[in-house]
Image (tube, coloured by chain):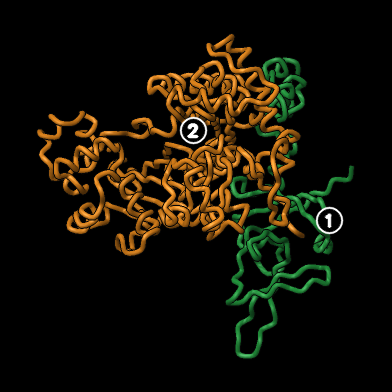
Chain colours: A orange, B green
Amino acid sequence: MTYALIDGNNFYVSCERVFAPRLVGKPVVVLSSNDGACIARSNEAKDLGVKMAQPWFQVRHLEKTAGLVAVSANHELYGDMSARMMAIEARYAPRQEVYSIDESFLDFDGVRDDLVATGRHMRAAILKETGIPTSVGFGATKTLAKLANNIAKTADRKPGSYPAALAQVCDFSRLAPGELDALLAATDVGAVWGVGRKTTEKLKAGGVHTVLDLMRADIVTLRRQFSVVLEKTLRELKGTSCMALDDAPPTRQQILVSRSFGTPITHVDGILEAVSEFASRAAERLRQQGSVAGAIGVYFMTSPFRSNDRQHSANVTIPLPRPTADTAVLMRAAEMAVRTQFRAGFRYAKAGAILTELQATGHEQGELDLLAAPDEPAAPATPADPRARLMSALDTLNNRFGRDSVRLGSTAVATNGADVAVWATKQERRSPRYTTRWDERPVVRA
Amino acid sequence: MDSPDDFADGAPVGRDGPAAPTVRRTSNAFGTPGTDSTVRRHDLNDVFIRHQDATFMMRAAGDDMHGAGIGDGDTLLVDRALTAQPGNVVIAMVDGELRCRRLERASAGRGRCASMRLVADEPVAPIEIGEDTPLEVWGVVTTVIKSLL
């Protein structure tokens, strides 16, 4: 087996930079929907010490002292750029699993090409066609592909951390055993997919610091101390594939449910049915892990392997007015997404729903009131009729994201001469939705 | 889409096309363009967009490129998959900003290779591409859409 994992480097920031080249080279962070926390950081921002998910108020002084630029999450833009990136990746292998908004696994089983060359070609195509820089990792299992990806990215970002030849594209299968061991000895055990923070702490307390330590640890002892998940991870690290495509533990940040259709779907009802089911299954998983989602994304696409078919891929992300795990709300949002994006005359081969901006249930209440539109009645403490809630939710959405109300209570502080307004107050540091709203398409001086 | 009501009036995409093929098929023994999958109504996407995943739409601001038929407010189709050739109208990144200009080969200086520059139709100083200002083409403009109403 050979898997590849491709992901976008600092994906949200990279999306912003495609349309705002002035952000290139600057420290940039993307803030969550309510501008509460940094959910993406450019390398320059990482170098300033901004941590993932760090509250904005803790780092906002860097705006003045270090030129840090903060923008609000622009999920419509990220969703569309993701769709473009995924569609390009899908050209390179017969099977693809879109794992999150910026990551996908490709199944290269049986492909005899030089994988590093293929990886570089794919990376160059994505960069040229979308402007998004990516990292590519190849390995015999999904866990190894993810680790190789991590090394490819780190080698690129921190020269000297790993051999320079592994930067951007790293293929474990091409390494001699000694070389691989050296890499694994230089890699923190916490970098392994599925090894969480608590497990990492426990492992380190037991003397397991690097990936190599983990691979040499006694499996019986591990089994006694940790869950079977870690045992599976260990087997994957040793090259035995335990996870097939579309068979992965859910990520913490996103929940994705997707499927390829046996027979292409041409009618909107078919897509609606599929996507509603995905949204409902994703909502179940969301509630299982005790989370609520701040946004739902929906995508559906034709098959790039049916070269006679006209190609179309749709991808839209709908920010939710308040984080929810309510199936009815999520399904309706998904339906809305399908109805706006569906185009007749295409043979759709794959669809998916993705929940993002997850947070623990209970956290949303305080933010909810802060976010409520001024004219919105106080949020009901108990869920009312879901339909009524949805309607009020959509109204809030329109109020908050609609063209006319966006400027309300906001202060335009800067433009870059190209009509790109940056707002100073909550939520509306958001860049234009360049590729999904006609009135917000990029303006170019001609 | 501005409000959910947009779906109700049937105007947006997705509501046209062969919604009820079986009915049409029985009503016309010869088939209709709507049901025969090999016959397609003109679709501007097919005609003007060669690389769907790499094509972006922009709005031109200014009249510097009128010689290329680009006026203020026109919509530009920009294909990032194409490699810019001399003579192409391109979107380039200049001083952290996107600019629409024509890519042109500058005359070769003595003992130097021909370099490139970005020119406009208006008497605007060309942007010379050299070691100090590397050429960063964002995409190639393939089509100009001009609305007459």
A331 shown above or below A106:
above
Residue type at tag 2: Glu
Chain letter of the residue beneath label 2 in the structure image: A
Q: Secondary structure at mark 2?
A: loop
Tell me where residue A45 appears, x and y as whole percent: 47, 53
Q: Is residue A253 left or right of residue B107?
A: left
Tell me where residue A444 appears, x and y as whole percent: 72, 55
Viewer-side residue, A90 vs B62: B62
Residue type at tag 1: Gly
Identity of the residue drawn at 55% across and 32% down: A299
Q: Secondary structure at mark 1?
A: loop
Tell me where residue A353 appears, x and y as whole percent: 50, 28
| Mark in the foreground, 2 or 1 | 2
Residue placed furthest toward the bottom: B110
Say which mark, if any, is on residue B71: 1
Mark 1 residue crowding within 10 angstroms, few (<14) / some (14–19) / many (20+): many
Give the labeled residue for mark 2. A357
